[in-house]
């Protein structure tokens, strides 16, 4: 274990995992704000990698090329009063990041071991004092197995499709609800069945089903646990 690893082990982590649309993004951001802690949106790292893959026309089944690309990514997050900006090769790509097409490529390349390996260190670097709220699929199982609190947030696929539909509509993207539902189911299957770091609750995670809960209710529940 290196010096840096020992030091970072003293930094508290709350891991929030779950499928897309479960509300974990909002929960994690609000929790990080509430605690005054750092925030890791690990999905954004996979989406940035996906954008780079698309930009460089790398075939999604070329594992070696994907791994090499993920290892040399030039990505940065900049926090300002307007929120967090994601930069790829110095260019602000925040608006493009959340699109459905990028999400689909992100989910495909996330099944590649070389891509996941290249992103491990980058994710652990977010662990800084006073603490970290980490949002993703494998935060509690792989990236921060020693997290102080692990939450696995779920919701039915129907409600997740509806939430995502509303989100996209607000951004001016028009997507058919039943198509979104099918895509969410397909993405769940891909994320859950991949052999490396599949989407699943850590054994010591607290499972919260947000199907019938508002984000406020989930936030209150988690703050009570802390
Ligand atoms: O949370 P999100 O929708 O932004 O994530 C996009 C994709 O990235 C998702 O389909 C699976 C993948 N991902 C992952 O495999 N591991 C993570 N820790 C975060 C995201």
Image (spheres, helix red, strand yellow):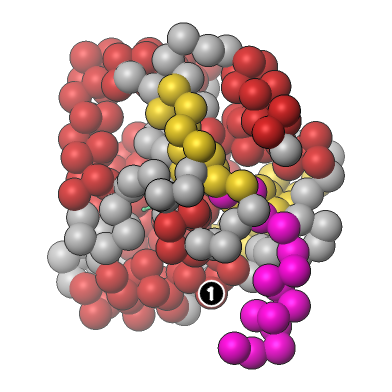
Residue neighbourhood size for the residue with mark 1, other residues' Cα within 10 Å, grouped as few (<14), some (14–19), many (≥20): few
At mark 1, the secondary structure is helix
**Residue drawn 39% across the image and 44% down it:** 201
Q: Which residues are magenta?
A: 1-15
In the picture, measured across the screen, residue 95 lies left or right of residue 223, that is: left
Give coordinates of residue 156: x percent, y percent: 33, 19
Find disc 1 in the rendering and name its residue. 121
Would you say 140 lies left or right of 178 here? right
Residue 102, quarter of the rendered image: top left
Q: Residue at x 64, y 90 (%)?
A: 2
- Where is 66 relative to 54, above or below? below
**Along the horizontal axis of the image, is 183 left or right of 122?**
left
Q: Is residue 201 magenta?
A: no
Image position of 216 (left or right of 19) = right
Decide which of 188, 141 is in the foreground and name it: 141
Residue 206 screen position, x and y as percent:
50, 37
Q: Quadrant of residue 141?
A: bottom left
Q: Residue at x 34, y 46 (%)?
A: 200
Question: Measured along the vertical axis of the image, is residue 1 above or below residue 92?
Answer: below
The extreme bottom residue here reads 2
Q: Quadrant of the C terminus?
A: top right
Q: Is mark 1 within 8 Å of ligand 1?
A: no
């Amino acid at each position: 274990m290196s010096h840096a690893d020992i030091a970072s082990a003293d930094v508290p982590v709350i891991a929030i995992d779950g499928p897309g649309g479960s509300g974990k993004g909002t929960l994690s951001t609000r929790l990080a704000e509430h605690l005054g802690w750092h925030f890791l949106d690990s999905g954004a790292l996979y989406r940035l990698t996906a954008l780079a893959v698309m930009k460089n026309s790398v075939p999604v089944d070329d594992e070696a090329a994907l791994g090499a690309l993920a290892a040399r990514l030039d990505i940065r997050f900049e926090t300002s009063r307007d929120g967090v900006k994601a930069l790829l090769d110095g260019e602000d790509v925040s608006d493009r990041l959340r699109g459905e097409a990028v999400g689909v490529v992100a989910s495909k390349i996330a099944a590649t071991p070389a891509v996941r390996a290249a992103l491990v260190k980058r994710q652990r670097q977010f662990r800084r004092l006073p603490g970290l709220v980490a949002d993703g699929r494998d935060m509690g199982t792989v990236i921060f197995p020693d997290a102080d609190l692990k939450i696995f947030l779920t919701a039915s696929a129907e409600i997740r499709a509806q939430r995502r539909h509303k989100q996209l509509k607000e951004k001016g993207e028009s997507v058919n609800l039943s198509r979104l539902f099918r895509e969410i189911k397909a993405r769940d299957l891909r994320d859950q069945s991949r052999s490396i770091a599949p989407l699943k609750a850590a054994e010591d995670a607290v499972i919260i089903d947000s199907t019938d809960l508002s984000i406020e209710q989930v936030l209150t529940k988690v703050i009570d646990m802390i």
